[in-house]
Amino acid sequence: MVACGYKPKKPYLSELAKKNRDLAHKGKRSFNWKGGRIIDKFGYVQIWKPEHPNAKMAGYIHEHRLVISEKLGRPLLSHENIHHKNGKRSDNRLENLELWTTMQPAGKRPEDLLEFAKEIIKLYENTKV
């Protein structure tokens, strides 16, 4: 469409306006807000906790990771996984959860394995979940 011999300009948003627009619809201000508790496509419960160190970029953390993290009193490390004993991904009772670690060396010399074992003992010796 041409008006007065000129093509109309496309609307322009500054970077600040884009940032504010995106922030205005996150979390509780979202049109899709359902109370901060969702179940993802894999059946895991996610909780809105953007301030938690283990939260993803969207601000959600898996509830089972949150439960164990609070029990340990620290954020979970990247090599730590949570196992549901009964296999139900939405059952996040503390008695149904186990802390597992995926940290393992491959192809190490015996003296390196001893050093690795000492690190593991130091990291987990006082862990009771």
Image (cartoon, helix red, strand yellow):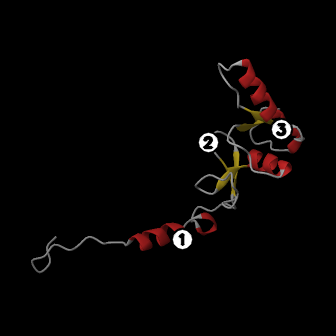
* Kind of residue at disc 1: Ala
The reply to whether dot 2 and dot 3 touch (C-beta < 8 Å) is no
The reply to whether dot 2 and dot 1 touch (C-beta < 8 Å) is no
* Kind of residue at disc 2: Lys
Q: In terms of image quadrants, where is residue 109? A: top right
* Kind of residue at disc 3: Lys
Q: Residue 66 carries which label?
A: none
Mark 2 to mark 1 CA distance (whole Å) = 26 Å
Q: Residue at x 62, y 52 (%)?
A: 56
Q: What element carries label 3?
A: helix
Q: Earlier in the sequence, mark 1 or mark 3?
A: 1
In this view, which residue lies farthest toward the left? Answer: 5
Task: From the viewer's side, name the closer residue of 60 and 107.
Answer: 107
Task: Write down the residue under mark 2.
Answer: 41
Q: Which of marks 2 and 1 is in front?
A: 1
Q: Which residue is drawn at 30% across and 72% down?
A: 11
Task: Write down the residue under mark 1.
Answer: 24
Whether residue 129 is visible, yes or no, is no
Across and down, in percent, residue 38 comes to 67, 52
Mark 2 to mark 3 CA distance (whole Å) = 37 Å
Task: Write down the residue under mark 3.
Answer: 122
Q: Against 49, is 94 above or below?
A: above
- Which quarter of the figure is the C terminus placed in? top right
In this view, which residue lies farthest toward the bottom? Answer: 4
Circle 2: is it few (<14), some (14-19), or many (20+) Cα within 10 Å? Answer: few
Q: Earlier in the sequence, mark 2 or mark 3?
A: 2
Across and down, in percent, residue 64 comes to 76, 45
